[in-house]
């Protein structure tokens, strides 16, 4: 019998439009357990001071909270050193940091940036800007029929001109797991660095940056039980050391003179201004919670929910599914109800207490590639149950009736 | 709640084909877009002497945005630009919950049926897309000879 996680997540017992909440928008953000909320309150209630600055005890306490969180993240990702862990606002900021600090300074005309058509805008738009400024070319890996990256396309487009390969580990629309370890090896063969968008993977599967041999990896805390406003950039120390700062100001300096500044060592070099210590404390508590559940268990629950949803939706003749025939799929199901716009579907589900995402999922080039303007997406976390899936299915079955198509 | 939104009237307008076409003599074509959801319409107006002779649209979107566009076109065809602008302002006021008096909303004819959207903040943009697009189109008309 599965553990009842509901006791740890009071919001999951709430109602939406008079029905018990079935929260199936975890790809957008996850709910927060008691332990995480307690940790944040504990920090602000008992340890708050500006870290790294004060010599008094309270500031030392705050610094310890912050640096302990960094150590926790380093262990969680199996990074070699805490210096390789940069706290940011979210995955978007992490990816922008790489694009602006690494991309703008290491690329020039004739170089190529290779990304996939399945990237979230946050791992796409920054590269467009880098390409525009440096004169580098932005290339795309397209998808095979099952939604996975086309092996032929990778062979064709990854070359000695490729300087950056930026790829999501799990697509936020298709839920397909890319073999990042293999892609990293291929990138390194041609002398490129690999940037991994881990926003949808780190919360759901074990990620070991040394095993993957990732040069950079970005993720957001809020998609894995933590508060909004805390994210992580992992980067190999040797690469980060050679990069110039992204933002500049307080706390990232060594010496400041009127016309010149020398910068602090890693990781402070990339953490300008007062940081989100409460957020880091929350992220640390979230990692504890996730490790308590165990990633094998998280994967087992999500795989069961994903497969169950696909099987049930396949029984409904007027539902169209995307990327649901591949084995390497986890955590979410993207679909459309024939002749009904996804926003209408989402409104009708909302009225029945079922929360899903509808729209382009910040992946407009992928939508165009799939030939859709937008889609519906149900995305899971370990605290979801088969009952949530049943509620989704029951609600979907009512959609065409409400739209007077049945 | 749903039956107040997805009414028979809105279903009919969202599927209606008559106004979904291109005008041979469009004075102006205006693209309207909701970046957050991807809804997109292209509104075409034929205007002469300050009067909307004909109007049509193309595009894709949810039932609310499509029905709202269709209703707006029916309402505005044959009206003067000034009158149509006043009605667009009234409609947007209704959706934003600023105008609630039903007697004032009668002028909107069938479009008044979208009043309940004012209680659904997530769908306000769907209902107002066409009307904002119309407003932009009219502003861009200033440079077009003989339109006003």
Image (cartoon, coloured by chain):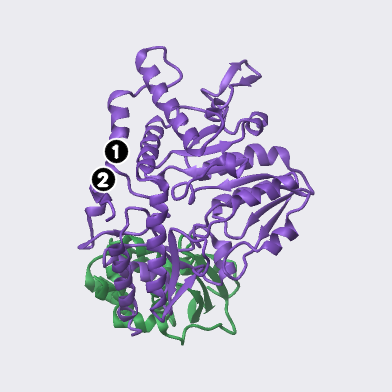
Chain colours: A purple, B green
Q: Residue furthest left?
A: A18
Residues indicated by labels 1 and 2 sit on the same polypeptide chain: yes
- Does residue A33 sit above or below B137 in this rendering? above
Q: Name the quarter where the N terminus of chain A is drawn.
A: bottom left
Q: Is mark 1 on a helix, strand or loop?
A: helix
Residue A155 appears at what percent x and percent y?
73, 59
Q: Which residue is drawn at 37% across and 56% down?
A: A301
Q: Total label count?
A: 2
Chain identity of mark 1: A
Nearer the observer, A34 or A362: A34
Tell me, yes or no, if residue A349 can be seen here: yes
Query: B131 or A219, which is in the foreground?
Result: A219
**Residue A386 spot, x, y in % from top left:** 31, 63
On-image quarter of the C terminus of chain A: bottom left
Occupied quadrant, residue A357: bottom left
Write the residue at 57% across / 68% down: A368
The residue beneath circle 1 is: A35
Return the mark for residue A108.
none
Image point (22%, 54%), residue name: A14
In the picture of the structure, the residue carrying the numbered disc 2 is A8
Given the image, what chain letter belongs to the residue carrying mark 2? A
Location of residue A111 in the rendering, given as x and y in whole percent from the top left corner: 76, 48
Q: What element carries label 2?
A: helix
Cα separation between marks 1 and 2:
8 Å
Whichever of callouts 1 and 2 sits on the residue coming sooner in the sequence is 2
How crowded is the residue under tag 1: few (<14 C-alpha within 10 Å), some, or many (20+)?
A: some
Q: Which residue lies furthest to the top in this view?
A: A55
Q: Which residue lies furthest to the bottom in this view?
A: B18
Location of residue A380 with respect to A279 vertically, above or below:
below
- Mark 1–mark 2 CB contact (< 8 Å): yes
């Amino acid at each position: 019998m599965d553990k009842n996680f509901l006791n740890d997540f009071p919001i999951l017992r709430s109602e939406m439009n008079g029905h018990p909440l079935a929260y199936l928008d975890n790809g957008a953000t996850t709910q927060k357990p008691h332990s995480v909320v307690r940790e944040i309150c504990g920090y602000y209630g008992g340890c708050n001071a500006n870290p790294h600055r004060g010599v008094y005890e309270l500031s030392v306490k705050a610094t310890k909270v912050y640096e302990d969180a960094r150590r926790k993240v380093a262990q969680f990702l199996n990074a070699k050193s805490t210096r390789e862990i940069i706290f940011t606002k979210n995955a978007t900021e992490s990816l922008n940091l790489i694009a602006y600090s690494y991309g703008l300074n290491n690329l020039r005309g004739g170089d190529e940036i290779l990304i996939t058509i399945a990237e979230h805008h946050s791992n796409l738009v920054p590269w467009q800007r880098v390409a525009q400024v440096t004169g580098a070319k932005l290339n795309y890996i397209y998808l095979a029929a099952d939604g996975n990256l086309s092996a032929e396309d990778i062979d064709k487009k990854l070359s000695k001109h490729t300087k950056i390969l930026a790829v999501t580990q799990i697509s936020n629309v298709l839920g397909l797991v890319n073999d990042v370890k293999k892609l990293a090896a291929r990138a390194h063969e041609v002398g490129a660095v690999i940037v991994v968008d881990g926003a949808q993977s780190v919360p759901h599967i074990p990620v070991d940056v040394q095993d993957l041999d990732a040069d950079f990896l970005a993720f957001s805390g809020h998609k894995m039980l933590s508060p909004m406003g805390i994210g992580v950039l992992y980067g190999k120390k040797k690469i980060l050391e050679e990069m110039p700062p992204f933002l500049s100001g307080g706390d990232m300096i060594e010496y400041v003179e009127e016309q010149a500044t020398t910068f602090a060592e890693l990781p402070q070099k990339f953490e300008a201004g007062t940081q989100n210590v409460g957020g880091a404390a929350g992220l640390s508590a979230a990692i504890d919670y996730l490790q308590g559940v165990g990633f094998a268990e998280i994967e087992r629950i999500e795989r069961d929910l994903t497969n169950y949803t696909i099987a049930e939706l396949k029984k409904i003749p007027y539902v169209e599914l995307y990327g649901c025939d591949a084995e390497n799929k986890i955590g979410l199901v993207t679909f459309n109800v024939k002749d009904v716009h996804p926003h209408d579907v989402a409104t009708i589900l909302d009225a029945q207490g079922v929360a899903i995402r509808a729209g382009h999922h910040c992946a407009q080039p992928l939508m165009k590639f799939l030939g859709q303007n937008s889609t519906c997406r149900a995305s899971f976390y370990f605290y979801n149950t088969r009952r949530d899936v049943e509620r989704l299915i029951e609600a979907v079955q009512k959609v065409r009736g409400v739209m007077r198509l049945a | 709640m749903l039956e107040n939104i997805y009414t028979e009237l809105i279903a009919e307008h969202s599927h209606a084909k008559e106004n979904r076409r291109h005008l041979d003599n469009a004075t102006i074509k205006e693209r309207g877009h909701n970046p957050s959801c991807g809804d997109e319409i292209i509104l075409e107006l034929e205007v002469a002497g300050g009067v909307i002779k004909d109007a049509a649209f193309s595009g894709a979107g949810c039932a609310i945005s499509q029905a709202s566009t269709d209703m707006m076109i029916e309402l505005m065809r044959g009206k003067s630009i000034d009158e149509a602008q006043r009605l667009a302002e009234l409609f947007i006021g209704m959706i934003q919950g600023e105008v609630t008096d039903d007697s004032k909303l009668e002028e909107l004819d069938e479009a008044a049926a979208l009043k309940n959207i004012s209680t659904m903040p997530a769908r306000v943009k769907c209902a107002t897309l066409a009307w904002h697009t119309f407003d932009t189109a009219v502003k861009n008309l200033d440079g077009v000879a003989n339109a006003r």
